[in-house]
Image (tube, helix red, strand yellow):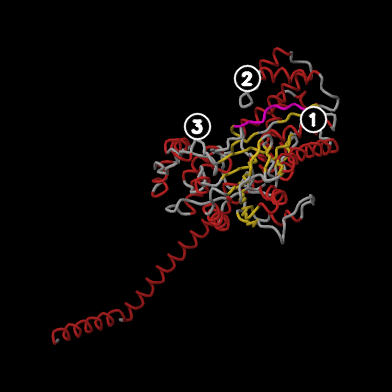
Amino acid sequence: MSLNIKSLEKSKSILKNMYFAGVNAVLPKTLIVNKVKFKNGILYVGDQSFELKENVYLIGFGKAVMGMAIVLEHMLGNYLKDGIVSIPSASTEAMWESEDKSYFPLLESGVIKYCEGSINNQPDDRSLETTHQIIDLVESLTENDTLIVLISGGGSALLYMPRPVIDFEDKLYVSKMLQNAGADIKEVNIVRSKLSMVKGGGLARMAYPASIISLILSDIVGDPVESIASGPTVYSAKRPKEVIAVLKKYNIFEHLEGDVKKILMSTERFKDKQLLTRKKQFKHVTNIILGNNTVAIEASSLEAYNYKLTPIILRSDVVGDVHDVSLAYAHITSLICLALDKTLEKEEFFAKVKDIPVLSLSATKVDEIYNLIDNVSEEGLVLIGGGEPTVVVKGKGKGGRNQELALYFSLDWLTKIKAYPRFSEYEVIMLSAGTDGQDGPTDAAGAFGYPAIGPLIHDIYTKVKSMASKMIVKVEEDKEAMRKKKEEKEQFDIKKYKEICKTQELSGYLRAKKQKRQQKIKLILIKMKQV
């Protein structure tokens, strides 16, 4: 299988530009500037308007909220009285190094305090302290105040307050077990909310009776506001039945004990009736989705036209096991190649595509795809999908869902080529990357995948396996050598002891020592009788 390096690098460059077009469309600054306006005490968000109260306060938590907060502080001016924003480590430094010079934090006149914490999406002592400060602020608010809440992906780690009876590590441990078992983000957040003071509507409850406007950047498929950052401004009954069902699904419930288990099984006792509408929503809260992956996907699609490519948007809500997602992408790619090759008629294409697991495309979408294939540009076409596959963590390797998806696709597409060599005539390359710029606990946003990677991975795997085998053999050999050395020493010590005993016996030393010991015992007994 030949590899045209020049063509490969060109394709990588195009895919990166499409990715950055999508990311730029959902940049927090861009979204605030395009969708939020402020005039004469009225805040306009899309087609909604809000008359701000006497005092305006701002809080935020998440990877993207710093950019949102900076623009809003410029926009609101003297109306804004105070603010606290919880952001990931190194965010401030990244802001000053940004190429976008349109907005920067107000250093002298600004009222917003930016507090860093959390590394690799995990809460720490700093995010805990910042959450204490946020709680102190919102609990002091009155009915004459408006609270603007900025929420984005990563907010769960940056707004972090376990229930008092739970240790910091216990809550982290439960969340980590769920993530490693392959639970999706919605399931993880159901459990997180139960263990938290601020999630699942806890923050909104604390801020009552102030009016709350939440501006949200969604990082979850389908934009469920109750799951984004674990829904701190969305009412949740936190029913133990739902929580236990998630934990049992992944065989975790039976391993829990103590205060954690008691909390998870407990019924909430908050008196929220006066705060809620008939639809069980907070009366004093308005939650608004400002941006999501649909916005990013549409921007990437438009960028494709700049390279004379035909974009095909599959769907924005692809979920499932990462390998299942890879197989689905590889399968639809193979069917499109067959359609381009005119070896697959429309009826057969329609029948095979609509039943692909994971994608489950509608008849209308399949028809749209075939019509686009029929009129594809000379430069080729690009499939665009969005979503969030799940990964079951095995071993101690590093990576994230995007890198794993790219790797799986490389191997799955190579398998397709081996089964049908004509596929090798098509240049197929995947880019899987996250819009937040971080894939798992790594410094990469994602990775490219293409069939030539397959043999490289096989070679690396073979070498690593060989090295591991040699290492295991050496460890076992070292253990055996140490065991033999220990045995030899023990035998030597026994032999030496016997020789010493024999020498002492022959010399009369032991007999004299025994008599002396008996005399000493008699003396001790005599003294005891005298007492």
Which element type, helix, strand or loop, lies under badge 1?
loop
Answer with the quarter of the image where residue 295 lies: top right
Residue appearing at x 23%, y 84% in the figure = 520
What's the CA distance linking mark 2 and mark 1?
25 Å
Identify the image quadrant of residue 298: top right
- The magenta segment is 311-319
Q: Residues within 10 Å of mark 2 (few under 14, many from 20)?
A: few
Between the C-alphas of marks 1 and 3, the distance is 52 Å
Q: Give the residue drawn at x 48%, y 40%.
A: 275
Residue type marked 2: Asp
Residue 187 part of the magenta-drawn span = no
Q: Are marks 1 and 3 in contact (CB under 8 Å)?
A: no
Q: Which mark is residue 472?
A: none
Which comes before the other along the chain, label 1 or label 3? 3
Q: Earlier in the sequence, mark 3 or mark 2?
A: 3
Residue 317 screen position, x and y as percent: 63, 31
State which tag comes first along the sequence, 2 or 1. Answer: 2
Q: Position of residue 309 (x, y in %)?
A: 82, 29
Location of residue 183 in the rendering, given as x and y in whole percent from the top left corner? 53, 38
Residue highlighted by disc 2: 355
User: Which of the two residues, 525 or 290, is positioned nearer the viewer here?
Assistant: 290
Q: Residues within 10 Å of mark 3 (few under 14, many from 20)?
A: few
